Amino acid sequence: MGGKSFKDILWKIFRFVFLGFMALISVGPLVWIVMSSFKSNKEILSSAFALPTSLSFNGYKAALDLAPIFKFYGNSVVISFTSTLLNILIVSMAAYVLARYTFKGSTFITLLLSASLLVPTSALLMPIYKIMMGIGMFDTRSGLVLVYAALGLPTSLFVFKSYFQGIPKELEEAAYIDGAGFYRTFFVIVFPLAKSGLATGAILQFLTSWNEFMFGLVLTKSTEVRTLPLALNYFTSQFSFNYTAMFAALTMVILPSIVIYVLLQEQVTTSMVAGSVKG
Amino acid sequence: MKTKKVMATVLSAVTALSMAGGMATTVKADDVTEITFPTSWVGVSVNTEWFQDRLEAFNEEYGDSIKVNVEEIAGDQNYVDKLKVLYSSNSLPDTFSTGGYNLIDSMKDQLVDLTDYVDDDWKKLATDACWDVNSRDGKIYGIPYTRQVIGYFYNKDLFAQAGIEKPAKTWDEFFEQCDKLLDAGITPLSMDTADSGWVTSLMLGAMIGESDEGEQFMNTMLPTDYNTKEFIDAATRIQTMFQKYTTPDAVGGKYENAASNFFMGQTAIIANGPWMISDFYDTSMVEDGFADKVGTAMYPGDVMYNSGKIGFNVASKDEKTLDATLTFVKFLTNEESQLKMLEITGDIPAMEGLTSDNVKPLVNEVIANGDKAAHSINDFQSLWYANVVDEISIQYPLLAQGEITPEEFAQALTDAAQKN
């Protein structure tokens, strides 16, 4: 009896140590960034891991002075949300059809859309730049929305298709018997059932759009439409840097991603678990 | 029906947004010529204040007839990357300045030959060396505004602690001083490998430029063979520096790592240009009075980087825009602008003899060192092929870790150069 409880205690300690370690390596860098945003450059350079000597918001002020963060922030929010909505709406419809119906060329279409995941971003840069110039969408938010929505297409398709395949067909058949049409069945029956899968795709798509840098740089030229990742480069150049402002800006940039993830994490976990037992 | 409506609304909204984007091109009065100028002189860039000042002054004087559409591209490498994309799609901006990075050779088919536009008065605004760096086959492709005068900075307190009285005159003496610093518990050198290893490469070039042959190599435009005795000897010494005399963060480190170590008194020597001097006075970076501890020096063998620097390149596609662009470039490179550059950033003017009392004393020391140099060399970023400059960052860590020999390092750069 005593041996068993000793084992239990040991196991408990191991679990706490392991979980504590995992939490530390996950949260540590974020805490370090936030902490550094309150230190002066000198403090960061001399003792990178020490606590700030005072709670100074100078870094945040400098960050806002040096770069048009709020403007970029607003653009990032609009572009990321819109591209996520567009991606979910369009790709979920495609994924549903590809998951439910077998028709001539359906495998080819699935492969074709999935294969775009393998095309490196740098190879897409030039053609997309030329297309955007050609159709007059260069330097517009809507141009970035379209590009970002398309960039996330293969990932979302993969996630949504697997999820739709796991939803029992009988539910849809029942809807059809009750007189629902194709669109109604999809939007009223299937869409809500696939909430977890859609949330997973949405998070991945949102993070892709939120963090994307290269297209944001190449497809825009005015600060009116640029996004947050570009702002981070305002704080380091070849021969100068302002770490405090950079960490303050980083804090402002990463916070929304964390909040979104925390708010939706339950959906993601559910989706992952649900997906793991599907054939 | 409802879902159809929702879909139609969403698609209409996207289409409307797209059309709004398409219509975003500005319509201006005929008498105002618009030109485009992307710049990395934003945020913490050392030139930001200067550029804002000059742009404001230009707009005051020419705002009625010329509108400069400034595109902010923060980060020097991002700036070059975007220019490469624009070049590939034949849509380079009217003018651009890479701050020394040589894009003339890879882009000159789309650059305007400025030879006929640069008259004698304009030529007087820069030394011959500056025009040479901006010319190819006798044609001018760039308008210079600064010179490259670079030695190294050292921490006088740390030198004194190690019993060193003055900077070394030969490389053998330099390495002896490094040993003395090590014995005193001081890391001698700030070095880096990322972003073409600017600080390290300055040392490399200075070692190559010690001999007459090496000096000639360091003034050769676009060298394609790095398998020379001078280059391999210098690479051998750089390998020793990496392995013995620098900080652990040098491998993989950027300029800011190298600079931070010097600012914090963790290293005694850093190679860099006079634009760094203002940081020695910035108390958010360094302790109060740090600038008084810093000395300037020529490289052993009285070598100094003392050369021209790539300036503004022009790629306007019609005469009207070209005229406006040249007016803008002429304004940014005139005597007043160069003087402001010296006073605000500490960067040395392209024009000979242009001085100001309103500069930090260390800046004048660097200029004086440049004038005294026995060997004047140019920097690698201005002269070497862009892909060779990129290759350096890949090869330095291998050299530092002893995974390649100095001979293999030279061969790797040769291979890269010969791909052009």
Image (spheres, rainbow, N blue to C red):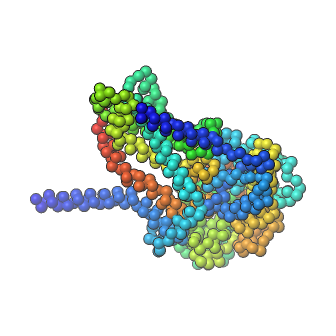
Residue B97 image point, x, y percent: 71, 53
Q: In which quarter of the image is the C terminus of chain B?
A: top right
Q: Which residue sits at x=80%, y=48%?
A: B31
x and y percentages locating residue B194 in the rendered image = 58, 55
Q: Is residue B221 visible?
A: no
> In the displayed structure, would residue A174 be above or below residue A52?
above
Q: Position of residue A19 (x, y in %)?
A: 31, 57
**Vertical comparison of A169 with B68: above or below:** above
Q: Identify which residue is drawn at 73% across, 72% down.
A: B359
**Along the line of sight, the residue nearer the viewer: B263 or B98:** B98
**Image position, residue A112 (x, y; %):** 48, 30
Q: How many labels does the image show?
A: 0
Quarter of the image with the N terminus of chain B is top left
Q: Residue drawn 25% across and 61% down?
A: A13
Is B145 placed left or right of B261 in the picture? right
Q: Which residue lies furthest to the top in this view?
A: A104
Q: Which of A109 and A171 is in front in this view?
A: A171
Q: Which residue is situated farthest in the right direction here?
A: B120
Residue A236 location, quadrant:
bottom right
Q: Which residue is drawn at 49% across and 38% down?
A: B9
Q: Which is more toward the observer, A273 or A175?
A: A175
Which image quarter: residue A122?
top right
Of all residues, the one furthest to the left in this rendering is: A1
The residue nearer to you, when weighing B344 against B268, is: B344
Q: Is residue B30 visible?
A: yes
Q: Quadrant of residue B361?
A: bottom right
